[in-house]
Structure formats: structure tokens, C-alpha cells
Image: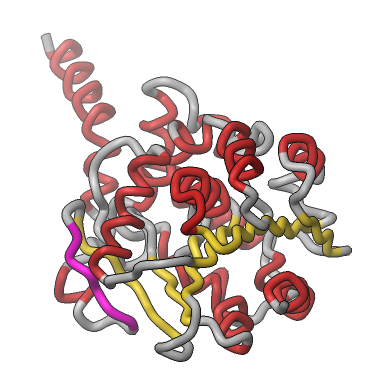
Amino acid sequence: MTVVVTVAALLVLVVLLPFLAEAFRVPITKSIQDKVPGQIARLPQGATHYRWSGPEDGPVAICIHGLSTPSYIFAATENSLVGLGYRVLTYDLYGRGYSHRAKGPQTADFFLSQLRALLENQNVKGEVVVLGFSMGGQIATAFASEEGTRIKALIIVASAGLQRLKASGHSRFWLMPWIGGWLTRIAGGWALRRELVESRTTATVIPDLEDRQAAETRTRGFLPALLSSRRHLLANRATEDHAQIARNGTPVLAIWGAEDPVISLSAMGALAEVNPNAQHVQISGAGHSLLQTHPAQVAEALRKFLTP
């Protein structure tokens, strides 16, 4: 009987362990949100942390970040767009940064609902330029596909959605039923922090970038958000969205890192096939963190594309 009770207790512990681990992570509370730089919009799905910069009468540019690093990733890009006269909106996707850990499968519709609610909240009407990085590129592409002529231009940087993402390291477990969610919630933060240490670089416009990214892994709801995005949005390709954008005649600029281990240059070929009119800039020596490591080259590509 003692053995049975012990085994049963261990099984209960195994089941509860992911929830216990999540409970000990730092929650993003309203009191925290009220103290952060930028502003908080109270939207139907939950609070969204956002920031405006640039001239109030400038054309609007919206920047959408990727899977794991919140909107501060656009520090240099934001300055470049402001320098071109744009009114720039950056915001944290649900489950990241200081935004709400909203429930539900993180599909394209999930993220588009957040974006549309934010634009309505901020009374943004008329034409906009949309820029997306990595997973944000796939979200921006879905938005541009559906919004048609409202999109003045689409800019994607190291964009997801054009190839099957490589499953390496801890990410191999993300798509596994049951065990994937269990492992991610328990060891996902540790695995991500280990990768950050291994990839640490001083050549970045945000000196404490890796430290800030590591802190993100210790916040409640972050790891489940990554898991959901990987299993839903990133499990699909954006080929048809890009085809629709081509039919709409929307100007497209795609910026790629020549040495990107996450989004390979085969994505550039895939986009060229579905949208021959898209413009491409390949940055030599750049990896997936090109917004941070090669800001001058990104800024020059933006200037050439957006300046009449």
C-alpha cells in the first residue's frame, strides 16, 4: 500500500510540476504595467503595452516584433523611421513584455485581433506602413493581405512564414503532444537562457539585450505563449497571404541576414516565386539579430525603400 501511495503521489507531482513552476514565475500585474515606460491600452482581450514616437502629424508606421523579444527590439529601427518623418507605433504582443497573457491559441487571427483593437483604441485610420520582424513578419503579412489598399507598404525583416522553421535544441520538443508542453513549462526557460549565453554578442545597439531577454523567460505566461505561437501561427505558411499582397499591388521590402541560422535565404527565393515584384535586401554577415547587429544597413534599406 505504501508503494502505491508513493507512486500515486509522484504521479500527481509530475502532473502538477509545470503548473507549480509557472506559479513561481513573475506575474505581469496592473501595478507593474502602470509603472513601465510607454502606455497601456485596455483592450477586449487584455492590456497591451504600446509606445508612440515621432511627429504627431507624420505618416503612421507600425512595428510588430517576433516570437520572444518584445517591442524594445525596435530601438534602432524606431529611430530610423522617425528620422524619415514617420509616426511610429510599437507594441508588445500578448504573452510578451508588459502586455496581458491573453488566453487562446496564438493563431494569425489571435494577433490580428490585438492589432486591430489597438489601432481602433488609438484612432488610427487611413494608410499605414507595416514592418514585421521574424514572427512579426508573418503577422504583418497576414494584416497586409487582409487590409489591402490601406497598406501603403509592407516591410518584413527575417520573416517567418515562408519556410518550415528548423527544430533544434529545446524547440524539438515544442511540437510533441503532451510531453512538449510539460517540458517547455519546466525547462523551457533554462534552455532559452542557455542559448542566450551561447549566442551572446557585444555588437548590439542594446547593451543588456541578453539580460533583458533572460528576464523575460522568468515571467508568468511567457513560455506558454511561445509554445502556443509555435504550435499555431508558426506551424503554417504565409504563401497565400503573400500571393494576395502581390495581387493587391502592395509595395514589399524584404530584408534578410545572409548568415541567419533561423530564417535561411531559401525564404527569399520562396517570396520571389510568389511575389516577383517584392524588393529584397540581403545584409552580408548578418544573422537573425540583424536589427541589433546591423542597424545602419537596415536603416539604409528603409531609407531607399521609403524615400520617394
Q: Is residue 122 above or below residue 147?
A: below
Q: Nearer the viewer, residue 253 or 288?
A: 253
Q: Residue at x 38, y 58 (%)?
A: 93
Residue 103 falls in which quadrant of the image?
top left
Q: Residue at x 70, y 73 (%)?
A: 302
Q: Residue at x 71, y 66 (%)?
A: 290
Residue 39 is one of the magenta-drawn residues: yes
Q: Is residue 112 above or below residue 30?
A: above
Q: Residue at x 35, y 68 (%)?
A: 125
- Which image quadrant: the N terminus? top left
Lateral position of residue 106 relative to residue 19, left or right: right
Q: Is residue 190 above or below residue 153?
A: above
Q: Position of residue 128 (x, y in %)?
A: 48, 66
Residue 186 falls in which quadrant of the image?
top left
Q: Position of residue 25 (x, y in %)?
A: 28, 57
Q: Nearer the viewer, residue 45 or 168?
A: 45
Q: Position of residue 62 (x, y in %)?
A: 47, 67
